[in-house]
Image (cartoon, helix red, strand yellow):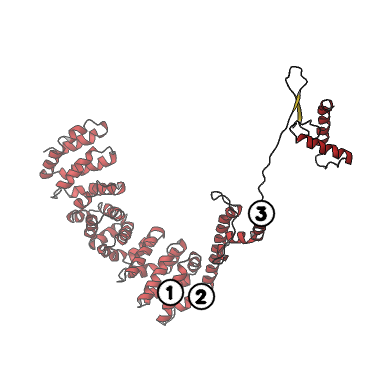
Amino acid sequence: MWVETGAKGHNEICSWHSTHTAVPLPLPPLGEREGVVKVTEWQNTHYAGDSGFQSGATTVRSDGDDGTEFHSKKYTMTTTVTETPPDLESQYTITRSQRVRAAMFPETVGEGMTVLSTQVDAAQQSNVQKLAEPSQLLKTAIVHLINYQDDAELATRAVPELTKLLNDDDQVVVNKAAQIVNQLSRKEASRRALVQSPQVVAAVVRAMQNSNDMETTRATASILHNLSHQREGLLAIFKSGGIPALVRMLSSPVESVLFYAITTLHNLLLHQEGAKMAVRLADGLQKMVPLLKKSNPKFLAITTDCLQLLSYGNQESKLIILANGGPEGLVQIMRNYNYEKLLWTTSRVLKVLSVCPSNKPAIVEAGGMQALGKHVTGSSQRLTQNCLWTLRNLSDAATKQDGLEGLLQVLVGLLSTDDVNMLACVTGILSNLTCNNTHNKTHYMVLTHKGLKQKLTTNKCRYMCIYVICISLP
């Protein structure tokens, strides 16, 4: 009876069960329940075989000889479910808003307060933590916008009153007003409001010119320096007559005032149309050349760049620099400093002056050839190039100059270069220095007897080297 009904009964029950899984099975009648209990008790004995009628286990035919033996396969599925303890789950629910607030606004978390974390793996951020960074960036941007707007509105409202105070006869009042404007000029938003008012810029310039108080002078010079960082500020300074006032500040004994003045003038020369002529008319060159005796390399770099901007393409400016001892000061810088930017800006000025017939002998007499020769083998390509071109321009005025043996040796060493432009400069310098100078010519031929002979094998440089050999022959 069990064998005949096992497979069929199993299939019928499984089919019915698969289509009614969502509906609980009704309890069998009392008599049938007793049968289920008996089957269960029978299974728990040493006859543990399962008919499949109650359990639904699959009945499989064995491979016995008579084919009449059957046994059942029983499958067991285990599912592991991790549950959060009810008390911890309730804590997460209660502290959810607190955790979000701590992530977005950490400054609201009081000292000693511990925020429950949901982070299980330290290497993997929780969702709240992932949202924290962009929310902080957004909050910072909003705060900056609010502060920017506040600064702009504050400066706009304060400008009329500050203008009156800067024009006051009482120097104490002027000083206090200048300090306030100086603070406003350091922030971009309020600085934009200041440059939109020509009246306040003009008042600052007048206060700088007329005040005998060093603190007021320092504050007003700082204001103009800050305003010069924007094009609108440069135009406002230029229109208010700020250039002559700044040129006068170049004679100030206060280092900070001197720095503010030269940097503001430098910004004007670089970016403001008409500033070069205004500086020349205000005798700016006469005030700048003596500043070459200062010892601060960064200050000197700005000063020499101003000289280059003013002298390039202007013969009158070159002569003013010469009349004020400019060549000597520039050569001294090339000889004594190793700050690359300063050496580069100074070599640019010397390059401009080296095409002036009046400045050329003055630079040579000041030792310019030797000073420039110190930097033709350095690591700075732009400095090397400027020095070589300047030496090339000066070399025709140094044909009778003595003490150039060291320079000749350096130049001969550069003949091995593969840079055609550099080689053109070197050969031009050598040709001029050996022209009508027996001492230089003899020294040169001794140095280059082997070097030039080897160089003739290079087609790229052959003609220049032959030219130098020919003009150097006794």
Q: Cα distance, mark 1 to mark 3?
A: 64 Å
Residue 138 is left or right of residue 456, and the answer is right
Q: Which mark is residue 160?
A: 2
Tell me which amino acid carries mark 1. Answer: Gln
Q: Quadrant of residue 220?
A: bottom left
Residue at 62% over, 62% down: 98
Q: Cα distance, mark 1 to mark 2?
A: 16 Å
Q: Quadrant of residue 361?
A: bottom left
Tell me which amino acid carries mark 3. Answer: Pro
Which residue is label 3 attached to?
85
Tell me which amino acid carries mark 2. Answer: Pro
Indicate which label's residue lies in the foreground, 1 or 2. 1
Residue 282 visible to the viewer:
yes
Indicate which label's residue lies in the foreground, 2 or 3. 3
**Residue 164 locus on image (x, y percent):** 47, 78
Residue 377 is left or right of residue 258, and the answer is left
- The numbered mark, 2 or 3, whose residue comes first in the sequence reads 3
- Crowd tier of the residue under label 2, counting other residues whose Cα lies within 10 Å: few below 14, some 14–19, many 20 or above: few
Which residue is label 1 attached to?
179
Give the position of the N terminus as an image quadrant: top right
Q: Is residue 441 above or below residue 102?
A: above
